[in-house]
Image (tube, rainbow, N blue to C red):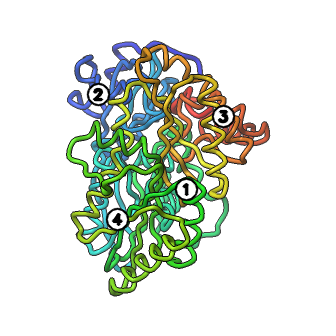
Amino acid sequence: MRARTLSNDLIGRFAHIVGDANALTRAEDQAGYLTEWRDRYTGKTPVVLRPGSTDEVSRILALADAENVAIVPQGGNTGLVGGQIPSAAGNEIVLSLGRLKAIRDVDAAGGTMVVEAGVTLHAAQVAANEAGRIFPLSLASEGSAQIGGVLATNAGGTAVLAYGNARSLTLGLEAVLADGRVWHGLRRLKKDNTGYDLRDLLIGSEGTLGVITAACVKLFPTPAERETAIVALQSPQHALRLFRMAEAEAGGSLTAFEFWAHRAQEFALSYVPGLRDPFTDAYPWYALIELSHGGTGARVANTIERMLTNAHSKGLILDAAITRSLRQAEDFWRLRDAFSEAQKGAGGSIKHDISVPVARIPEFLERAAVVVEDICPGARPVPFGHFGDGNLHYNVSQPEGMDRARYLALWDTMSEAIFEVISQLDGSISAEHGIGQMKRDALVRHKSAVEIDMMRAIKRALDPKGILNPGKLL
């Protein structure tokens, strides 16, 4: 789209829609909306608008369409690829959905819940729990991440293995299109074969096709029992064999299979207070296994103990710690969730959210380590992630003693080399964080021309003026 400078009069017209208290123009009020938490992206805006209803979102977009003004939708500002941050030009309005935080309906019997875009993931989980159900989507940032942003990026998290990603957990949407029209698609149907799936099109579109204002999500029965274990492993190949065994022996009871390198655990224990090491000795690799079951707990407990005994006898695991209490299980998950935060303490970190076929994870880790060492000798890979669905966070911390800025200047070079390995293994350069600003140029190199043309055609059809989140994704 063609950039334009917003006059004070036009800013006032936008502010009139939401009220002056919810139109932030002072730098000190805008600060929390203009920089993402890793400080990699910072932008400018003439005004941050905080609508309190779908109608206000509709009126904002109708005015933006008429005046050719760019809009950058934003949820909890927990995104990791800069998709929620405006450009430095200062002519894009930030549309914060945080005031849309009503839980409109919880239908425990029907297994659905209707939540607005500004509801945090944690609040949605609590509402489901209070109704005797669970909303299983779980992220390390769930206390701040909002439903709208979670759906806009099609977030995954730790429960994808059993329940699927955000798209799989959504039945219907309410969204505002680029011209201000509202799509009322909050259906509760599990089967609806009446044409193109507009819901799935908007989920994962990163605010480039429409602004999600509410969603109807799926709820599930609360497991009667959960059993969690952390196991020590010699290699990623052993992890793969253990995962196959867990699939065979636990079946549908297998709800999580997380995986990480020793360095991830070492950083977490060193830089995040209050964590406990489940073992007295250090090991090369680790996995967290969770089984859950809707009936009595004995079946799950027996399964995990039998499985780990069998795995040990076959030389697949070096050690194991099985939870004996809810507190211990929470400690295990707290350790797992600390890995990303902990890397800040180790200096600069070049981060990658990738996926490969599960069977190729060991090969990827081996090849990626070679690439990293070639580009920056002494750099420290810190891989961790969701082994069961092939999604790894392949983060690389700077060499000890290296200047942080000098190291981070290698970001694009290192990422492109790793993305090339990913492409050769039939993987994806973005598994759950999205494309945003960070991977926009890489996307063109690692998707086919046909795919890019199809995506651009959809963008032109739904946002012909290009006012929705320009410079992101495409």
* Residue at image coords 47%, 71%: 254
The image shows residue 259 at horizontal and vertical percentages of 47, 54
Question: Pointer 1 and pointer 4: residues touching (CB < 8 Å)?
Answer: no
Among the two numbered marks 1 and 2 on one chain, the one whose residue lies closer to the N terminus: 2
User: Could you tell me which secondary element the residue under label 4 belongs to?
Assistant: strand
Horizontal placement of 20 versus 211: left or right? left
Q: Which residue is mark 2?
A: 32
Of badges 3 and 1, the one in the foreground is: 3
Q: Determine which of the numbered discs, if any, sits on residue 443 in the image.
A: 3
Q: Which residue is mark 4?
A: 321
User: Could you tell me which secondary element the residue under label 1 belongs to?
Assistant: helix
Of badges 4 and 2, the one in the foreground is: 4
Q: Amino acid at mark 2?
A: Gly
Cα–Cα span, label 1 and label 4: 42 Å
Among the two numbered marks 3 and 1 on one chain, the one whose residue lies closer to the N terminus: 1
291 or 439: which is nearer to us?
A: 291
* Residue at image coords 57%, 53%: 236
User: Could you tell me which secondary element the residue under label 3 belongs to?
Assistant: helix
Question: Pointer 3 and pointer 4: residues touching (CB < 8 Å)?
Answer: no
Dividing the image into 4 quarters, which one contains the C terminus?
top right
* Quarter holding residue 346: top left
Among the two numbered marks 1 and 4 on one chain, the one whose residue lies closer to the N terminus: 1
62 or 205: which is nearer to us?
A: 205
416 or 67: which is nearer to us?
A: 416
Of badges 2 and 3, the one in the foreground is: 3
Cα–Cα span, label 2 and label 3: 28 Å
